[in-house]
Image: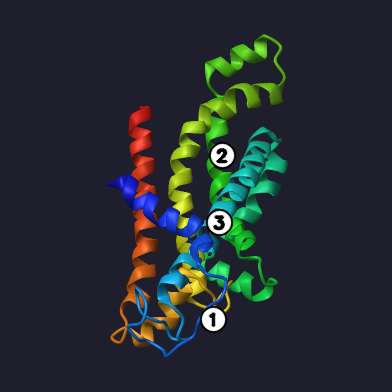
Amino acid sequence: MRFLLLAVPLAVALAGPWSVPDSTVHGASFTALGLLGTDFAGRDVWHQVLLGGRSLVLTAGFATAGAYLLGTVWGLTAARAPRMADEILMRPLDVLLAVPSLLLLLVVAALAPDGALAWIVMLVHLPDVARLVRACALEISARPAVEALRLQGESRWRITAGFVVPSMARVLATDAGTRLTGSLYLVAAASFLGVGAPPDAADWAVMVDRNRGGLFLNPWAVLTPALLIVMLAVGLNLTVDRAQKAAS
């Protein structure tokens, strides 16, 4: 069941654009024509569904991967740095943590150029990832095994790369599933609020926003993209939870 919850929206999002005809036919708004009827602009809802998921999935995936790449380097550097350098690295992130994530996204998006949504979501996740990595690195560095490696003459960064990072991999992998779901939420919420995507874009969140006025005329124009977003988020969480239980 969890496999279907994740596989169906992923397949629609990633492979869907290849199944859509090159030419888009416009008709009347909110009619029953086509598999799922038409949307507010008279476009085939099924074609818009096939086109609307790739940007959501790729943007969320890129933002999460970038946040972990930058956050891991940031957190490890802070954990291994002298106290003053540690303070300089971590205190600006505390300022970002004090601002609600969606509010921070909307404020930064209003100042950033178009197409920067993935980078903004990456910025939103960076403080949490960096603090998590730093906390894990400090705890692992206090273990007797690390002291034994120091006594053997291993360098600080070789200990970090060879022991500390592998030791925190499981914690980071567990957090990554939740973080990716959070990225999906932020990207979808931003698109729903008109940030990061044009108002007539083929995007699942935009479809929910723009077609809700015709909910009783053609509910599939709203329910289908909303259901796919929910399936993607729930399926991702269940898959990560199952993978963690299997590894334990």
* Residue at the spot 49% in from the left edge and 62% down from the top edge: 19
The kind of residue tagged 3 is Leu
Image coordinates of residue 67 in percent, x first then y, are 60, 50
Q: Is residue 95 visible?
A: no
Image coordinates of residue 224 in percent, x first then y, are 35, 69
Image disc number at residue 199? 1
**Is 199 displayed left or right of 47 in the figure?**
right
Q: Mark 3 points at which residue?
A: 58
Q: In which quarter of the image is the C terminus?
A: top left
For residue 84, which quarter of the picture? top right
Q: Distance between the residues labelled 3 and 1?
A: 19 Å
| Secondary structure beneath label 2 | helix
Query: Outermost residue toward the top?
Result: 152
- Front tag of 1 and 2: 1
The kind of residue tagged 1 is Pro
Query: Outermost residue toward the bottom?
Result: 28
Q: Name the residue under label 2.
A: 133
Q: Quick one: label 1 or label 2, which is nearer the N terminus?
A: 2
Q: Residues within 10 Å of mark 3 (few under 14, many from 20)?
A: some
Image coordinates of residue 243 in percent, x first then y, are 37, 35
Q: Is residue 239 above or below residue 167?
A: below
Q: Nearer the viewer, residue 78 or 175?
A: 175
Q: How crowded is mark 2: few (under 14 residues within 10 Å), some or many (20 or more)?
A: many
Q: Distance between the residues labelled 1 and 2?
A: 38 Å
**Is 147 displayed left or right of 156 in the figure?**
left
